[in-house]
Amino acid sequence: MTKVFNKISDWQKEREKIGTNKTLGFVPTMGALHEGHFSLMEKSVKENDFTIVSIYVNPTQFNNKEDYENYPDTFEDDLGALEKLNADYCFFPSYEEMYRDNYKYKVSESELSNKLCGAHRTGHFDGVLTIVMKLLNIVNADKAYFGEKDYQQYLLIKGMAEAFFMRTEIIPLPTIRSEEGLALSSRNKRLTEDELVKALEFPKLLKSELNDDQIKEELSSKGFVVDYVESIENRRFGAVHLGKVRLIDNVKI
Ligand code: PAF
């Protein structure tokens, strides 16, 4: 049975009991869990003696109030999935617990965080890095697992863990896609049926032989509002708006 902790101090007592001879894997999430999260949880359960999953919709990483307010809340189902996948612990804190300083202190990065999604979502990565730093410090895991769908987020978190000599190893795992190729995301739940079909064009075009500008044009002509399509080294990154939903993806090229 998955044990739920709301208070940092209660979790810390349990963490002490686990000790240092057994390994602890950590999967941070904002809930609304899907196959992408399940693949991270399965890997953690396989690689570690114990697994903890956090469920916390972090307000400081939302630059858009509507997006935050409409973020799906499926806690009961999420907990059911944790039980099914044999996650030992769930950390489910409140804002008051996580932001005792009311976000007076934050973690920032000054280069990569200003590019791609960072250029379009002011303060987003400050919010992500700050909450992940807090979670990593609280959970005190051996390994933490992140999906490559948020590849920029993964790179920034890995860089932060190195820069601050954090003990947790940051592990990336491949993006999980629907059969038709759409990267799974909690926000897909908010796409209409028509939009779900149209969304398939996005990964298809990112993987195509067209160059970044041509892909942007194609996407715009199909009704997407494009934030960016940009190739960096051997990866092409993209972010688009479709109806009320913002989709991001990246592919190796
Ligand atoms: O990728 C996410 O779901 C979030 O950005 C994370 C890492 C849980 C931090 O809130």
Image: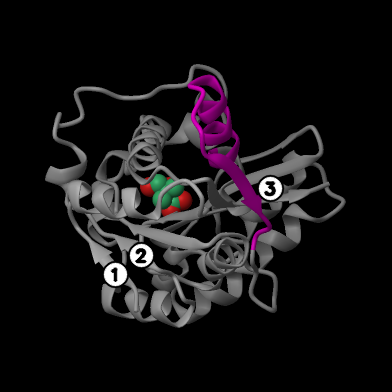
In space, the residues marked 2 and 1 are separated at their CA atoms by 5 Å
**What kind of residue is marked 1?**
Lys
Does the residue at mark 2 contact the one at mark 1 (Cβ under 8 Å)?
A: yes
Q: What is the crowding at mark 2: few (fewer than 14 residues within 10 Å), some, or many (at least 20)? A: many
| 192 lies left or right of 11 | right
Residue plotted at (33% across, 80% down): 77
Sequence order check: which comes first, mark 3 or mark 2?
2
| 56 lies left or right of 174 | left
In the image, 147 versus 217, the foreground residue is 147
Q: Can you tell which of label 1 and label 3 is closer to the viewer?
A: 1
Image position, residue 186 (x, y; %) = 44, 65
Instruction: Identify the coloring.
Output: one colour
Q: Can you tell which of label 3 and label 2 is closer to the viewer?
A: 2
Sequence order check: which comes first, mark 2 or mark 1?
1
Image position, residue 128 (x, y; %) = 40, 38
| 67 lies left or right of 166 | left
- Residue indicated by mark 1: 3
Q: What is the crowding at mark 3: few (fewer than 14 residues within 10 Å), some, or many (at least 20)? A: few
Check residue 89 in the rendering and tell me which mark sits there, or answer none.
Answer: 2
Task: Confirm whether residue 38 shows in the render.
Answer: yes
Rendering quarter of residue 64: top left
**What kind of residue is marked 2?**
Tyr
Q: Which residues are magenta?
A: 153-175
Check residue 217 in the rendering and tell me which mark sits there, or answer none.
Answer: 3
